[in-house]
Image (cartoon, rainbow, N blue to C red):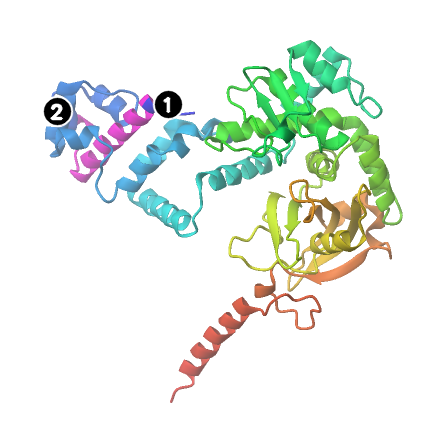
Amino acid sequence: MIVQQDIIKMIFGFKVKYHRQQLNLSLEELAKSAGLSKSYVHDIEKGKKYPKVQRIDALAKALGVDYDYMVSMRASKKLQPIVDLLSSDFIKEFPLEQFGISPDKLFELFSNTPDKVNAFISTIFKITRNYQMQREHLYLAALRSYQDMYDNYFEDLEQAVRVFRKETGLPRTLTGQPGILRKLLQDRYGVKVNDLSMAKVPELSGLRSFFQDKSQTLYLNSRLTEAQQNFLLGRELAFQYLNPPVRPYFTRIVETDSFERLLSNFRASYFAVALLMDEDSMVEDIRNFAREASWAPGYLHQLLNKYTATSEMLLQRWTNLLPQHFGIKDLFFIRLVGAEGLQHFRMTKELHLSQMHNPYANQLNEHYCRRWVSVNIIKQLKSDLKPGALPIIDAQISSYWQTENRYLCISMAKPDFHTPARGISVTIGLMVNNNLREHFRFLNSPDLATRLVHTTCERCGITDCEARAVTPSVLEGQQRRADILEAGQQLP
């Protein structure tokens, strides 16, 4: 993270360089006019030094601006967006080093081409304001980009899990040992586990967990399944073992005040899933599943039982291992929640590796394609699932309208933990290409349906769609504009 003092130096240096260039002064000329050395002015412009009062005054006079302007967060119209960005919480808290960007390089980009960068930043600010994007949206988008950059496989965390498992003697699978993680938390870290208290507090009864630092207690919701408990226990073990500088305390992140907190949550969750689903064991299980000649949902039920895992944990683990061990990098993961009446569906999580794939979160309140297996499996859930039953598992080949993109989509659905009357599905989509065909033998299985799909009904031109929720209003608007242009060309 960039500390506040560095931000102040950068903004001051940025102003000095910009106004010097506007006056067509060389470094040497400005230094001479202000009575300073050339190297000293150079360090100021690089954001490395911040001058004392007398020298600030000398620079201000040499540049034809006033002292207060130089030391404030005010700037000219052309510079203000960059100053706003440099002084924003986003820059202060965003871990540029995770993306291989040093503050020096960022500052150099801003100061070398301020007009172009200003126009770009101003555009971003306007977009975020018009679409009411909040800081957490930017953090989540940055996290997804971070995952994509590493193909969602993090060797340091995989290695940390191996070391932790060796240090603690944990077995590779925990089936039949429900108390082992609780005991480990208590014995190794002095963390108590309380399953009773959260249900007594109305504000907390719908949440899954809360860690109270002062009492070193992990509170768990009494309605959690064994798989959900294991994940949260593993996640707390990760926080204790990795000891990040900041961390969230609720399962659902309430305080999205920094990217670092979001990243520490991701790393702890990754550690927990890797701890519960051993890398070597799961890779072998994926190979065996992919070798099946026919689509075999029963095999996935076996894996859920073997690892005492939730559907989301299992498919998320696949997004780690498929790129690393099978070279399958064109994939997406989405989580979809269906409202009680099944008229509206909301995408609450997504991940895209290698490229932006066709199913993506839509912030315009458009209707997701009703031909998605992710949607249909929630409908199956509402009509077929009995209390305590296994998750419904389904799959299809989704062929996207007017594109060559085809995906093997594997989807699992269960009632939403927070609102059981709603259904929730998680889906992994793997782009069908030669590499996927080499690994997955059942792609041509007659038990695997192929459906023509789109992203949203509003943008879909499939004329004979039996599942359409609304008219293709976006396409109709485009056609009206095309008709107007054509009519204009026909005028005599």
Work out whether residue 226 or residue 463 is closer to the camera in this orientation and state it.
226
Q: Where is residue 324 in the image (x, y as percent from the top left)?
A: 70, 33
Secondary structure beneath label 1: loop
Whether 26 is among the magenta residues is: yes
Q: Where is residue 19 in the image (x, y as percent from the top left)?
A: 19, 36
Q: Residue at x 26, y 28 (%)?
A: 13
Q: How crowded is mark 2: few (under 14 residues within 10 Å), some or many (20 or more)?
A: some
Q: Name the residue under label 1.
A: 3
Task: State which region is magenta.
Answer: 5-29
Does 104 sit left or right of 329 as displayed?
left
The mark nearer the N terminus, 1 or 2, is: 1
Q: Mark 1 and 2 residues: CB-CB less than 8 Å, in contact?
A: no
Residue 57: which disc?
2
Up the image or down, 473 lies above or below 363; here it is: below
Q: Rounded to the nearest whole Å, what is the CA distance between mark 1 and mark 2?
A: 25 Å
Q: Which residue is drawn at 55% across and 33% down?
A: 253
Work out whether residue 256 or residue 197 is closer to the camera in this orientation and state it.
197
Amino acid type, callout 2: Asp
Q: Which residue is drawn at 28% across and 30% down?
A: 11
